[in-house]
Image (cartoon, rainbow, N blue to C red):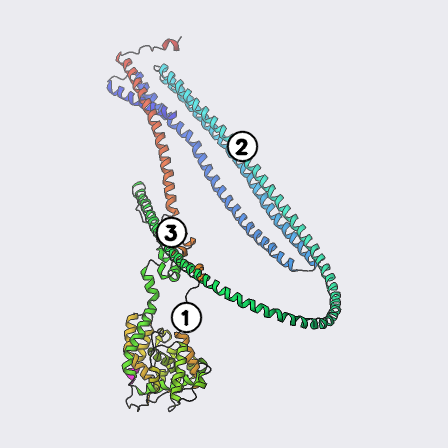
């Protein structure tokens, strides 16, 4: 209302200025109109300041109230956290005490412990009651403060309305005094504006009254509900305490009754033992009589057995035919089981492929949706908020990095794997092992036969194996070989030993030599070639080889190889046939010792190549090729000391070296699966290995790409747009009011122009009504 008066006064001042400028002669009415307009403008500015003071004071009081309310809330939260922590500790103490009470047997101690537990429970209840009382007090204070703020707000509203009404009445009188000529028009406009304003204020007061009534009702209902919940919790706790007390009392009475029963049972058992002893004495006499009767019965039963044997022979003949028929049916069933197993494998493979296809389809759809969301987020940041858009962090992981997927790749059979790289990586060790065996055999065939020391040591080792491994041969073999020579006996015994431990090729004779070499020594040099106790006790054959090489140089302390701990020999598995090589090796004649010795530089090179082969972090193909070049030199050098003396082995260490060889190179082979194993076989695929937790984690990573902070930004932007829409609606209403006022002002200008055109003021149409 004051704003409308202010606008009207400014327009009237502008009109008067135009009129004064248009007429050269100033009359008193025009001057008075200008002065009145200026005076009214001054009155409006003062009235606006007078009304604005109420709003400023109300805003200041609201800021103070929010600060005090925030501090009070923080204080209450701190008290509740401290009390919750103390109550939790006390409750845990009470709960842990029950276990010690159950282990006690003295009723008095149990009673004292229960009373202590009761005191602690009462203390916990009193703490909770104190917190409840404090919260009730805070609720009452909040209700009082709310009522006080409501009264203050009503006073401010009343003060504001009174000041507005005073300003309106004051301006009304001013306009009435200053605008006598336009009194009728202004009177009608004033009445219309007062009526609209009164309706708005009445509607506002009615809404406010209804809102206060609904708020008070909701508050009282909330307080009543809180009281009911507290009463129910208190009753539940009292009922639980009463039940626990009754249960413990019943347990005490039950234990006392059981104690009395045990005492009575012990007395009864002692009497029973005495009685049983007397009975057993009598039964011993009766058993003597029964034994004589049993002998007579055995004679009769022997006749019955003879008759049953004849029946059994007939039954076996009948059952043999039945077994043949059942065997044929079993073969058919086995064939059916194999067909069903093949179908099951096929269906498992197909289901796994469908699972991966569905996974990829969902992944592509999810990525498309995520891309749309990020594009929308980028548009909102750059176009709506005018900020530079930073792409979110990428949390999406690869399916192959899931723990269950990696476990599946290692455990799932090769036929159920869709990734060829997994199958290749799993068998790379076996492929390299087999290649190493054949490459070594090709390179060693031409060199080992010409080395005399190697042949001597190998013959000595095979002789020791033949002498000390008789337990691997048949028992009657010793009697069968009595008439043969020693070489023939060694050949036969070695053939049985090699058949027992699975040696089937000449290549593995060299492998066997490598396991026996660490236990060899030079009988001529003794001290320089003596095998230390620590080297013999070592279970790692590769480390023992290098130690023996160092000992032949005479000073092993000058050599240090960082990769020594990582040296591991490649696994070599038995393969194909051994012909008559055993007899050829055993019958080899001793050759003269060669005067040439291996240089120190070649020994260093052999050591470095051994370490290079064992380094698993380097290229495996390069390792195999380097081993092929130096394998011949390495084995021939290990068969003699630094003075080219042949080595020997003590009989004590033959079985130990043989055990190491079998443990390193024996591979357990699985037989033909049984029918039960076929039926119980689990066709594990990657889709069945993937756990629900990993799948959920994988798809949750997509949600993490658009985090909660961006969701909050979208929600805040939505709220801001809604508020902006409300502001635009209010502006639309205000613009409609302005257009209406402009239209009315145009009508007033037209009427005023009619009066001014006659150079005299005409009597208004409603003058008679105003001045009777």
Identify the magenta region. 599-603
Marker disc for residue 701:
3
Sort mark 1 into few (<14), some (14-19) or many (20+) by Cα contacts within 10 Å.
few
Sort mark 3 into few (<14), some (14-19) or many (20+) by Cα contacts within 10 Å.
some
Residue under circle 2? 217
Q: Tell me: residue 157, above or below residue 711.
A: above
Quarter of the view holding residue 757: top left
Which of discs 2 and 1 lies nearer the camera? The answer is 1
Quarter of the view holding residue 132: top right
Question: What type of secondary structure mainly makes up the magenta span?
Answer: helix
Q: Secondary structure at mark 2?
A: helix
CB under 8 Å between callouts 2 and 3?
no
Task: Name the N-terminal-most of marks 1 and 3.
Answer: 1
Residue under circle 1? 668
Residue 623 x %, y %: 30, 73
Which of discs 2 and 3 lies nearer the camera? The answer is 3
Residue 625 x %, y %: 27, 74
The C terminus: image quadrant = top left
Residues 672 and 245: in front is 672
Sort mark 2 into few (<14), some (14-19) or many (20+) by Cα contacts within 10 Å.
few
Residues 284 and 261: in front is 284
Q: Tell me: residue 535, above or below residue 269.
A: below
The N terminus: image quadrant = top left
Q: CA distance from mark 1 to mark 3?
A: 44 Å
Residues 616 and 130: in front is 616
Q: Tell me: residue 405, above or below residue 186.
A: below
Which of discs 1 and 3 lies nearer the camera? The answer is 1
Q: CA distance from mark 2 to mark 3?
A: 47 Å
| Number of numbered labels in the structure image | 3
Task: Name the N-terminal-most of marks 2 and 3.
Answer: 2
Q: Could you tell me if residue 627 is visible in this image?
A: no
Q: CA distance from mark 2 to mark 1?
A: 83 Å
């Amino acid at each position: 209302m004051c704003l409308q008066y202010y606008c009207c006064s400014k327009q009237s001042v502008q009109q008067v200025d135009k009129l004064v400028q248009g007429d050269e002669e100033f009359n008193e009415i025009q001057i008075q109109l200008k002065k009145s307009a200026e005076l009214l403008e001054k009155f409006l500015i003062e009235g606006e300041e007078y009304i604005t003071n109420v709003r400023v004071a109300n805003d200041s009081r609201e800021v103070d109230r929010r600060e005090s309310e925030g501090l009070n809330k923080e204080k209450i939260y701190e008290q509740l956290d401290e009390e919750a922590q103390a109550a939790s500790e006390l409750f845990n103490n009470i709960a842990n005490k029950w276990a010690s009470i159950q282990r006690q047997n003295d009723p008095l101690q149990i009673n004292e412990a229960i009373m202590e537990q009761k005191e602690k429970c009462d203390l916990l209840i009193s703490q909770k009651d104190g917190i409840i009382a404090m919260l009730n007090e805070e609720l009452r204070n909040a209700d009082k403060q709310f009522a006080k703020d409501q009264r203050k707000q009503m006073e401010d509203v009343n003060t504001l309305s009174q000041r507005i009404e005073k300003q309106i009445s004051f301006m009304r009188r001013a306009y009435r005094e200053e605008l006598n000529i336009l009194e009728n028009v202004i009177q009608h406009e004033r009445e219309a504006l007062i009526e609209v304003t009164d309706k708005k204020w009445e509607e506002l007061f009615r809404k406010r009254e209804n809102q206060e009534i609904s708020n008070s009702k909701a508050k009282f209902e909330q307080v009543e509900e809180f009281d009911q919940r507290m009463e129910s919790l208190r009753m539940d706790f009292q009922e639980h305490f009463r039940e626990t007390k009754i249960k413990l009392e019943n347990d005490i009475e039950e234990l006392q009754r059981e104690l009395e029963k045990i005492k009575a049972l012990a007395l009864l058992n002692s009497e029973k033992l005495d009685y049983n002893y007397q009975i057993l004495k009598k039964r011993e006499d009766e058993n003597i009589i029964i034994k004589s009767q049993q002998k007579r019965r055995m004679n009769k039963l022997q006749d019955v057995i003879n008759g049953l044997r004849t029946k059994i022979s007939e039954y076996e003949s009948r059952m043999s035919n039945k077994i043949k028929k059942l065997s044929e049916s079993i073969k058919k069933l086995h064939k059916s089981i194999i067909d069903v197993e093949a179908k099951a494998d096929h269906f498992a493979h197909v289901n796994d492929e469908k699972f991966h296809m569905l996974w990829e389809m969902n992944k592509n759809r999810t990525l498309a949706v995520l891309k749309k969301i990020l594009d929308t987020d980028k548009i909102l940041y750059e176009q709506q908020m005018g900020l530079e858009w930073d792409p979110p962090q990428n949390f999406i992981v690869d399916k192959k990095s899931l723990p269950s997927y990696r476990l599946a790749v290692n455990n799932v059979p090769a036929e159920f794997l869709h990734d060829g790289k997994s199958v290749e990586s799993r068998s790379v060790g076996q492929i390299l092992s087999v290649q190493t065996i054949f490459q070594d055999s090709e390179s060693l065939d031409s060199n080992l036969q010409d080395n005399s020391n190697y042949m001597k040591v190998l013959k000595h080792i095979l002789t020791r194996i033949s002498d000390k491994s008789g337990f691997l041969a048949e028992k009657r073999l010793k009697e069968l070989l009595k008439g043969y020579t020693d070489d023939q006996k060694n050949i036969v015994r070695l053939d049985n030993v090699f058949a027992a431990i699975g040696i089937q090729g000449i290549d593995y004779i060299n492998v066997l030599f490598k396991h026996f070499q660490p236990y060899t020594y030079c009988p001529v040099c003794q001290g320089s070639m003596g095998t230390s106790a620590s080297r013999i006790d070592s279970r790692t054959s590769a480390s023992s080889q290098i130690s023996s090489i160092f000992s032949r140089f005479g000073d092993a302390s000058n050599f240090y190889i960082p990769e020594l701990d990582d040296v591991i020999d490649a696994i070599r598995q038995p393969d194909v046939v051994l012909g008559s090589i055993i007899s050829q090796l055993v019958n080899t004649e001793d050759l003269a010792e060669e005067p040439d010795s291996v240089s120190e530089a070649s020994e260093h090179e052999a050591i470095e190549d051994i370490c290079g082969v064992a380094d698993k972090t380097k290229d495996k193909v390069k390792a195999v090729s380097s081993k092929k070049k130096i394998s011949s030199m390495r084995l021939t050098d290990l068969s003699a000391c630094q003075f080219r003396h042949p080595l020997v082995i003590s009989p004590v260490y033959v079985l130990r070296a043989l055990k190491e060889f079998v443990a390193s190179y024996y591979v357990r082979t699985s037989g033909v699966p049984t029918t039960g194993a076929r039926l119980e076989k689990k066709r594990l695929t990657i889709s069945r290995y993937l756990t629900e937790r990993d799948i959920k984690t994988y798809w949750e990573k997509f949600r993490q790409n658009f985090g909660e902070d961006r969701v909050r930004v979208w929600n805040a932007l939505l709220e801001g747009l809604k508020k902006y829409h409300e502001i635009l609606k209010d502006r639309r209403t205000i613009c409609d009011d302005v257009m209406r006022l402009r239209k009315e002002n145009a009508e007033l200008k037209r009427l005023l122009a009619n009066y001014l055109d006659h150079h005299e003021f005409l009597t208004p149409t409603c003058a008679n009504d105003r001045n009777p």
